[in-house]
Image (spheres, rainbow, N blue to C red):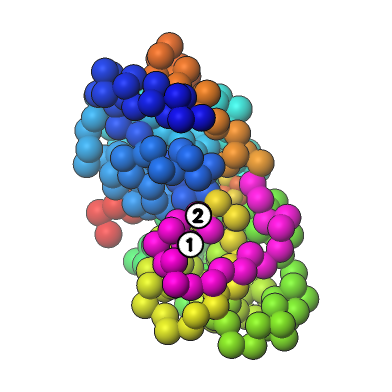
Amino acid sequence: MEQLIEEIKALKAQRNALILAHNYVRPELQDLADFTGDSLELSIKARDAKAPLMVFCGVRFMAETAKLLSPDSTVLLPNPDADCPMARMADGEQVKAWRSEFPDAVFAAYVNTTAETKAQVDICCTSGNAEKVVRSLEGQKIVFLPDRNLGGNINNILGTEMSLWNGCCPVHDQVTPEMLKGAREFFPDAAIIIHPECKAECVAEADAALSTAGMLKFVKECDKKTIVVATESGLLHRLKKENPEKRFIPLAPEILCPDMKKITLEDLRDALKFNQHEITLAPEIMEKAVKPIEKMLAL
Ligand code: 13P
Ligand code: SF4
C-alpha cells in the first residue's frame, strides 16, 4: 500500500491534480485528498479552485456537480460505477412530467440528483443548507425531490407542507427508531447524532440531525465524551482522527454505502495515469443544470 500511495503522490504532482474526497469514502483516499468534506463544501471547493484537473473521490452526482461549477476543468471519477442509488430515483423525464402536475410550484432538488434532473428544477440544496434554501422559498408552493426523508424532516422543522417525491437513501433509510432507543439505553451519557436522510421518527430520537460537516463541527463543540453516530461509517475516520480524546459508537454496522466504497487506491492511481473516467455532459444540460446550483450557492 505504501508504494501505491507514493505512486499516486508522484502522479498527482506530475499532473498538478486537485483531489477532492467526500467524508464517506475509504480512509486512505480521504488522507490523500487535498480536501475532504460534505457535499456543500465540495461544491464550493470545486467552484473556487478552478483547477485544470480535478479527481473526485465520491459518487457520480458529486463529480457532475464539480463539472457544472467548473466547466473548463477536466473532472475524473476514478470508478465510473460509483453512483448514488437515490440520484437514480428521479430521472429528468419523470421530473418534467411531475412539473406539469404542479405548474405553479417551485421545484427544489437535493444535490443527490443527476445533471439531467437538475436541468428540470429551480433550485438545489444539500443536507447542510436545506433549511436555508427552503426558507428562502417562503410563501410559495414547493415540490421537493428525491429524498422524502430529508424533505419530511425540513417540513417538520419549518412547518412547511412541501410535496415530496417518494425517493430515499437506501443506506440511511434502514435506520429504525428502535436502534436509536437501544443506543440511548446502552449509552445514556452519549450524544446521538443522525443524518437528515434518516426517517423523521429516527431524527426525533437523536440529539441533532446534521450534514456530515455539521456532525464534525458538532462533535468538536460538544462536551460529551461519547458520541453515537447514525450515518455512513466512512465519517468515523475523520471523527476519530480529529477528536482522538472522544469515543465514537457507530449506530449499526449496516449503515455502509457500497457506492461510496467503490473507488480504491488502484482506481485513483489509474485515473491519474490514464486520465479516466472523464465526466462529460451535453452542453444544453450543463447550461440548464448549473442554474439551480448557482441559485443555491448565491444564498
Ligand atoms: P453530506 O456529506 O452533504 O451530509 O451528504 C451525505 C450524503 O449522503 C452524500 O451522499
Ligand atoms: Fe447515495 Fe445514500 Fe450512498 Fe449518499 S449514502 S451516496 S445518499 S446511497
Residue designated by label 2: 237
Q: Position of 289 compared to 208: left or right? A: left
Task: Assign a secondary structure to mark 2.
Answer: helix
Residue at (42%, 80%) from the top-left corner? 222
Residue 285 lies in the magenta-colored region: no
Query: Could you tell me if residue 33 is visible in this image?
Result: yes
Mark 2 is on which residue type?
His
Task: Assign a secondary structure to mark 1.
Answer: helix
- Badge 2, how many Cα within 10 Å: few under 14, some, many 20+? some
Q: Are marks 2 and 1 in contact (CB under 8 Å)?
A: yes
Query: Could you tell me if residue 91 is visible in this image?
Result: no
Q: Judge whether 299 appears above or below 30 on screen.
A: below
Q: Is disc 2's CB within 8 Å of ligand 1?
A: no
User: In x, y percent, where is residue 159?
Assistant: 51, 79
Q: Return the residue found at the far right.
A: 178
Quarter holding residue 93: top right
Residue at (68%, 56%) from the top-left corner? 255
Magenta range is: 236-257
Residue designated by label 1: 240
Mark 1 is on which residue type?
Lys
Q: Position of 212 compared to 251: left or right? A: left
Residue at (67%, 74%) from the top-left corner? 202
- The answer to which of 138 and 45 lies nearer the viewer is 45
Quarter holding residue 174: bottom right
- The answer to which of 52 and 200 lies nearer the viewer is 52
Query: How far apart are the alpha carbons under marks 2 and 1?
Result: 5 Å
Looking at the rendered image, the quarter that the C terminus falls into is: bottom left
- Badge 1, how many Cα within 10 Å: few under 14, some, many 20+? some
Residue at (48%, 40%) from the top-left corner? 28
User: In x, y percent, where is residue 81?
Assistant: 60, 27
